[in-house]
Amino acid sequence: MKILVLNCGSSSVKYQLIDISSEEALVNGIVERIGIEGSFLEQEIGSEEIQIEKEVEDHSQAINLVINTLLDDEKGYLEDIEEISAVGHRVVHGGEKFSESVEITGEVIEQIEEVSDLAPLHNPPNLAGIRVCRDLLPNISQVAVFDTSFHQTMPEKAYMYALPYEYYEEYGVRRYGFHGTSHKYVARRAAALMERDIEDLNIITCHLGNGASLAAVKEGSSVDTSMGLTPLEGLVMGTRCGDIDPAIVPFLQKREDLSPEEIDDVMNKNSGMLGLSGISNDARDIEEAAEEGDERAKLTEDVFCYRVKKYIGAYAAAMGGLDCVVFTAGIGENSVTMREKILKDLDFLGLEIDDKANQIRGEEKIITNPNSETAAAVIPTNEELMIARDTARIAGILQ
Ligand code: ADP
């Protein structure tokens, strides 16, 4: 039983073909530069990598290219399109409508459209992918898996902003949170690694990639998360500022004569590690420059790690205790230095990092001393597998 998992961005389509019985990724690929000159498809099947350069004007052409490549006699994996049992689509924003993954129907498409102004950059390409697949594969079930749904268990006190209440009622202005599929996956894996029941645990999951967020996972459910109405709130990210005094926005708009779109670009694209360091949005470049003594790179690391540490303290208090801190995504899985800086001096929370165990990249491991009351772990995320599992469950495909 094979599930096709699609993640349609504005100019790319990432895909995986997953065998749901073995949970193995059979094919892994991406179409990049959709609608931009120089588009191409890259695909890996085991150690075999191919690249196809082809003009791809829109999502319809991109998904057609994916399916034709999967069916290709030489480069492909499938003999017949019917071998795909279901398609799972990543959808970024489900608003308050979706607290679970759902089978896609005409009504579901309308509901996703209704919340699309909350994620104008993300939901439209997600929807484009869904529409194309329904046309191309009309007999195959399609399931939507939302980045927001895991956080729908947050209590009101965590998701309400102290703005006039009518903005919540009229426009849905509240905190939603993102990266839900990843937070859910790594929290469950952490409980398994600790050989504990997730129902008995208070876990903080740190998804630290280009985009970054934390979640407080109490008894298996998200009770708070650092991203808000949009993925801009919370941590310092590659190019996003995260939490700032909101009064800075009109202040800078006036001083720099910026339109709403321009200030939005400053906060989303020119801030974070890139803005602070003036070097790069990539944590590897920052670490390298910091090691060579660059003061702003050191400051960037400090601000990034301090923000994560503050949230860990806040979420431990919010949950009334802490059993495990989990690190995942590019930085969380790979950066020994950042993990060390974040976890340093947390012994008041009963957490003692094991410096030797922490010297790992991209593998599942507990990185605290065996006698540390509170654990910390590295868990590589696998959002595609979570999407495939949900898709199989909802489409009624037996594992
Ligand atoms: P996203 O999926 O949000 O684009 P990723 O989860 O791939 O992001 O994470 C990208 C980030 O991970 C980049 O900042 C990159 O520098 C960082 N990263 C990847 N490998 C390493 C490494 N070995 N050491 C430090 N940071 C790393």
Image (tube, rainbow, N blue to C red):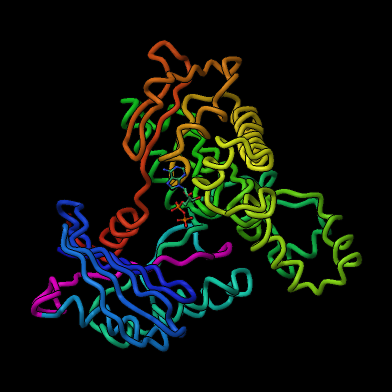
Q: Residue furthest front?
A: 292
Q: Is 285 in front, or is 272?
A: 285
Give the image location of residue 335, x and y in percent: 46, 38
Q: Going 78% across and 65% down the picture, which residue do you hit?
A: 167
Quarter of the picture holding the N terminus: bottom left
Quarter of the picture holding the C terminus: bottom left
Q: Is residue 86 left or right of residue 339?
A: left
Q: Is residue 88 highlighted in magenta?
A: yes
Q: Is 360 in front, or is 24?
A: 360
Give the image location of residue 60, x and y in percent: 37, 86
Q: Going 78% across and 72% down the picture, which residue do you hit?
A: 260
Q: Residue furthest top?
A: 371
Whether 297 is drawn above or below 128: the answer is above
Q: Is residue 342 highlighted in magenta?
A: no
Q: Is 233 in front, or is 395?
A: 233
Whether 19 is drawn above or below 360: the answer is below
Q: Which residues are magenta?
A: 73-97
Q: Is 261 in front, or is 173?
A: 261
Give the image location of residue 91, x and y in percent: 46, 67
Residue 50 quadrant: bottom left
Q: Is residue 291 left or right of residue 35?
A: right
Residue 391 quadrant: bottom left
Report how many numbered discs are placed on residues in the image: 0
Q: Going 62% across and 52% down the picture, which residue do you hit?
A: 279
Residue 398 quadrant: bottom left
Q: Going 30% across and 81% down the picture, which residue do you hit?
A: 53
Give the image location of residue 189, x and y in percent: 34, 37
